[in-house]
Image (spheres, helix red, strand yellow):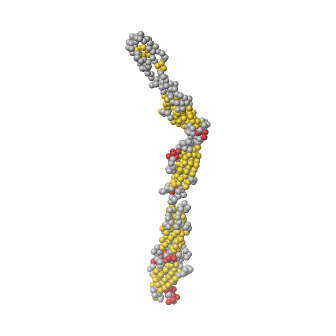
Amino acid sequence: MAYILLGVLLLTGVSIAENVIRFHILEELPVGTFVGNLAVESGLQFNFTDAELDGIRYSFLDQTKMRSLFTIHERTGNILIKSLLDRETECIFMDLCVLTFDVAIHSSSPQMFEIYSIEITIEDMNDNSPKFPTEHITIRVLESTVVGTSFRLTEAVDADSTNKNTIQSYELINGNNVFTVNASKDVDGRFSLRLILIRELDREDIDLYELELLAKDGGDPVKTGTLTVYIDIEDTNDNSPVFERDSYIIDLNEGTTKQTPLLAVTAYDNDVGDNGDIIYRFSSRQPDIERISETFSINEKTGVIYVSGEITFGKQNTFKLIVEASDKGSQPRTSYATVTINILDTANNKPEVFVNFLVPANDSLVSLSEAADIGTVIAHVTADDADSGPNGQVICAVTNEYVTLQNISGKPGYLIALKMEFDHELKQEHYISVTCSDNGSPKLSSSKSFMLRVLDENDNAPIFKEATYSATIDENNPFGKYCLKVSATDADMWPNDKIHYTLIEDSKNVFSINPSSGVITANQRLDREKQDEYI
C-alpha cells in the first residue's frame, strides 16, 4: 500500500501502562495522510516475531464517528486520515482539540486481546482569515459632530481556535487623519471596536469617506479580513447663502410694461437639501418696502425681478432694493444684496398744472369785487413735468386780458394778478384759462381753467329820467291831491339799484313824496294868492 508522505510534524506518544496511544496532527491534512502505526506505537513489533505480527489484527471498537474520520489497516495497524479534518468543526469553542477512540488489538496465535485508547490531538492550522459580518457598512454622521465622538463597530470573527491564529489587532487604512479606530479587549477576551472622530468635519470639503478596516490574526503569514466603512457626512446648516455680487445696477426706461423681467440675482449655498435650498425676497426691513412691492416683484425660486407697477420718470427716479436670500434650514441663514434701478426719462409727458386760489373760491368759481385794485393776487400757479431736459422745461400763459401772470423772484410758479379794473355793470363773469407748455418736440400742453365772478359794488348814483319836472294844480285842492310822479334808475345790481325817494326842500311840509313810487301829492290846500309857484 502506498501512503502519502507530507512535510508535517506528527508527534506520537504511548503510555503502555495505561494502554493509551497519543498522536498529534495538523488539521486540514489531505485524505490518506498517515497518522501512525499501532504496532509500532504499542511496542508489539518489539515483542513479537514477524510471523506472529502477521497474525495480529487491528480494528475499531464501536466508535461510529471516528470510523468516518480515520481508517485502521486491519493487518498493518496503520491509521490514515479518511476525511478532511477541520479543527473548528470538530472542536468548536474548545482550546484543546483531542479526538479519542478505542481500538482492539487481537490475535489467535499467540492468544491475545488488548484494548488501547487512541488520542489524536488536532493542532490548529491558520486556515481561516478574519471575517466581518458584512463586507461594508455605512455610518451617517452630522458634520457638526464633536471631535471625540465614537461609533460602535461590529467586530470581525476568526474561525481558527488557537490564540495566535485568532484576531490579534485592527488597523484603519486611509483614515485621512479624521478618524481612528480603538480596539480594546473586554474581560472575556473579545475585542470592543469603536471608530473615533479626531478632527472637525466639513461636508462642503468632503462629504463621503471610504475607510478600510483590517482585522489581523497572529498567523504566519498573517491573514486579514477587510471591512469597508463608508462615512456619509450629513449636512448641518453651517453656510449662509452667498450672492454672486453684493450689488447690482440697472437702468430702466419709463413706461416699461408690467411683467417685464429686469435681471436675476443669484446666490449659492454650499449646504445641501433644505439647508441649501434658497428663497429670494425683498427685505421687509427697508423703509419703502410698500412702494417697492407695488412697483417690482421677485420670483422666490429663480431670483428674477419683474416690473409689477407703473414706471414713471419724475415720481421716483431711483429705487434701491434690498434683496435677501434665505435657506430653508430649521434655523434659516440669510444674506443680502442691493439692486439699484435708475428710471430713465424716455417719454415726453404733459405738464401738470396746479392752481391755488388766494381769494374766495368754490371749486373752479372765484369771486372778486369789482372794486379790487389792480395788482390784486387771485391765485398761485405751479406746473410740474416729470420729464427732464427740454421735455421738462415749462412756460405758462394766461388767456384773459384782465389778468396777468407774474413770475415770483427766486421761487417756482406764477401769480395770477389783476391787470385791469373790473366793471360789474359791463361784465359780470370772466373765463380765465392758464396753459402750460413744455419745450419738447412736439410740445405738450396742459390747461387749468376757472370762472371769475365780479361782485357788484354801489358805484353808481341813481339818475332821474328828466332833469326838471313841472306840474299845474288848481288852488283850493283837496288834501292828497296828486301833483306828479318822478322816476330815477340805478345801474348797480340789487340791492344797490333799489331807489328811495325823498323831498329835501319842503320846510312847510306842503307836499309829500312816496319813497318807493316817486308820486308827489299835496299835503295842504293851496292858495294861489299866497304863493303861486313851488320849487
- How many marks can you see? 0
Q: Position of residue 4 (x, y in %)?
A: 55, 79
Quarter of the picture holding the N terminus: bottom right
Instruction: Name above or below for residue 90 compared with residue 42.
Output: above
Q: Which quadrant of the view contains residue 6?
A: bottom right
Q: Position of residue 77 (x, y in %)?
A: 50, 83
Between residue 481 and residue 313, name the one nearer to us: 481
Between residue 388 and residue 494, name the one nearer to us: 494
Residue 233 visible in this rendered orientation of the protein: yes
Q: Position of residue 474 (x, y in %)?
A: 41, 10
Instruction: Name above or below for residue 307 compared with residue 160.
Output: above
Which residue appears at 53% of the width and 43% of the height? 309
Residue 274 visible in this rendered orientation of the protein: no
Between residue 191 and residue 522, name the one nearer to us: 522
Which residue appears at 52% of the width and 26% of the height? 423
Instruction: Name above or below for residue 161 compared with residue 393.
Output: below
